[in-house]
Image (spheres, helix red, strand yellow):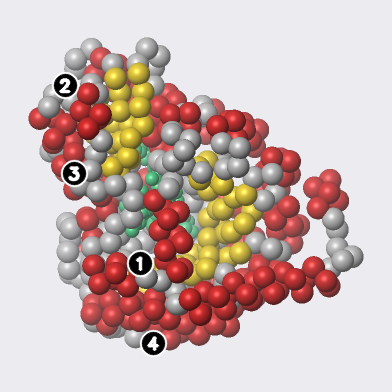
Amino acid sequence: MKIGFLAMSGIRVRDTALLELGLTLPGFVDRSKVVASLPSLGLLYLAAVTPDGHELYYYEAEEDGKEPEELYSCDLVAISTFSAQIFEAYNVAKRLSSRGVVTAIGGLHASVRPQEAKEHVDHVIVGEGEYVWPKVVDAVTSGAGGKIWYANQLGVVDVGNLPIPRYDLLNPERYNRYTVQTSRGCPWRCDFCASSIMLRHTYRKRPVAHVIRDILEIKRLNKRPFIEFADDNTFVDKRWGKQLCRALAPLKVKWFTETDISIADDPELLQLMAAAGCRQVLIGFESPSGSALEGIEQRTNFKARQFSRYEQAIRTIQSHGISVNACFILGLDEHTTQVFDDVHEFVARALPYDVQITVLTPFPSTPLYERLKREGRLTHPYAWDRCTLFDVNFRPKRMSASDLRYGLYRLAGSLYSAEAVNTRRNAFFGQLRGNAKKNLGMLSTREVLAA
Ligand code: B12
Ligand code: SF4
């Protein structure tokens, strides 16, 4: 069979005013370019586990109706999408079906809304795809009809034994950023988190040697790749994290990852990360005021407990040459309109290199979604195309939806202006130059790696 793997790519925002404003702001433009240039790792894993004897192709659709014509010559198309592009994915599936192509869909949204997806797509896969996908392909080969497949019936995927994703299916001229997973899951349980609801199992780390193997494959295809770790929270296990960094350093790749504030407590880890090519860590700080953090992490109240160390943690991490992308969510229950000034002031004091502001988003099936539904506060309950992190879909508790929307515009204007971006960047590089002078006596990279 000819099998196509289709990623719904690009960035989605419904609020056109924000889009227009955002696109003129340097800090926003940089990240949008990155988003547009990352392939779907999930699909590359599916390609790697596809039984032999099929022709495989990777495609992307940047907007509704823009899917490549070549897709229509496939026998089977596997679609991966998040909530924001789900309606576009359903439309593509309907067009494919009408031209005789069998369709399958998986990913976070289809996993929590399988009955909805089944109305538009032949095969719907709930959960991680690696064990179930070969069975779907065999079923399609033998002409079986569509159904909902529950991956967990085949057991939890052993991440100690994953194949190399099929990076070779990507056009090397189009991609210079690649995603690699080092771990799956996160030990925390934030009520708004859409990824941890699918990966309910404990935090699973991959063998360091396999991560290195995958990056060497990327380097075979692209001499100077930039790597984004597609993890939820990379450095939960500091001992394993140090082994990973020691193994990464000789590869001389630059990378970015998502992790939590606890890395700031371990200077050895930070030195190893910097020496191993870590350029940026994205950390969810979520709020510039501690009271708003109470209870949002539901296991141990982790985020509220860390609040008093936020500013110092940013300085500590950045002093090691690793920039911080500090993420804030606007519209948490305790937030009044004061939050916009508070974020602005926090950023001006702590000077993270990058800032990401998003609005609280009730993704389907998250504890947040269920709570807001119970409280009658969802304003667009099934408008999944508004689940973009930038569109307001609920009634905030201590301000109006319109206050939230316009507060986001105003804050975006102040945080992403050329002047604000330059101030943060100059502060970061200035701190580095100062450290370089002060720390001539510090351990060399080689000494750190040998330690
Ligand atoms: C890396 C990442 C990105 C990257 C790459 C995205 C991509 N194209 O894959 C970038 C930076 C581009 C990105 C952008 C966005 N992202 Co993002 N991203 C992530 C992150 C950190 C990891 C995703 C990943 O690669 N996981 C690893 C792979 C292996 O897992 P996977 O994709 O889930 O695939 C597995 C299964 O789902 C399943 N599967 C998936 N598809 C299919 C299809 C079939 C047929 C089958 C059988 C199985 C299957 O099998 C795979 C292997 O087990 C997640 C957080 C998370 N951990 O999920 C957020 C996350 C997925 N992103 C999110 C969002 C909202 C976005 C944006 C929509 C924001 C926006 N406004 O545009 C954009 C969308 C851009 C786009 N169109 O892709 C949300 C999605 C929530 C939701 N329910 O929709 C998440 C969960 C973060 C969050 N805020 O909670 N993202
Ligand atoms: S720390 Fe991040 S990945 Fe972990 S549960 Fe919270 S939002 Fe999800």
Task: Work out whether residue 182 or residue 354 is closer to the camera in this orientation and state it.
Answer: 354
Q: Is mark 3 within 8 Å of ligand 1?
A: no
Query: Is residue 393 depicted above or below 202 in this figure?
Result: below
Circle 1 residue:
23
- Which of the 4 quarters of the picture holds residue 412? bottom left
Q: Nearer the viewer, mark 3 or mark 2?
A: 3
Q: Nearer the viewer, mark 4 or mark 1?
A: 1
- Provide residue 142's location: percent of width, then percent of height: 23, 12
Label ID, residue 145:
2
Q: Secondary structure at mark 2?
A: loop
- Provide residue 125's location: percent of width, then percent of height: 28, 34
Circle 4 residue:
338
Count residues near mark 1 (Cα–Cα under 10 Å), then give few for <14, some for 14-19, many for 20+. Answer: few
Q: CA distance from mark 3 to mark 1?
A: 23 Å
Is residue 444 rendered to the left or right of residue 133?
right
Q: CA distance from mark 4 to mark 1?
A: 25 Å
Q: CA distance from mark 3 to mark 2?
A: 26 Å
Is residue 16 among the parts visible in the rendering?
Answer: yes
Label ID, residue 83:
none
Q: Nearer the viewer, mark 2 or mark 1?
A: 1
Q: Is mark 4 within 8 Å of ligand 2?
A: no
Quadrant holding the N terminus: top left
Looking at the image, which residue is at 47% across and 82% down? 344
Which amino acid, by three-letter code, is at mark 3? Gly
Which amino acid, by three-letter code, is at mark 1? Leu
Q: Nearer the viewer, mark 4 or mark 3?
A: 3
Q: Secondary structure at mark 3?
A: loop
Task: Work out whether residue 445 or residue 207 is closer to the camera in this orientation and state it.
Answer: 445
Which amino acid, by three-letter code, is at mark 4? Gln
Q: Earlier in the sequence, mark 4 or mark 3?
A: 3
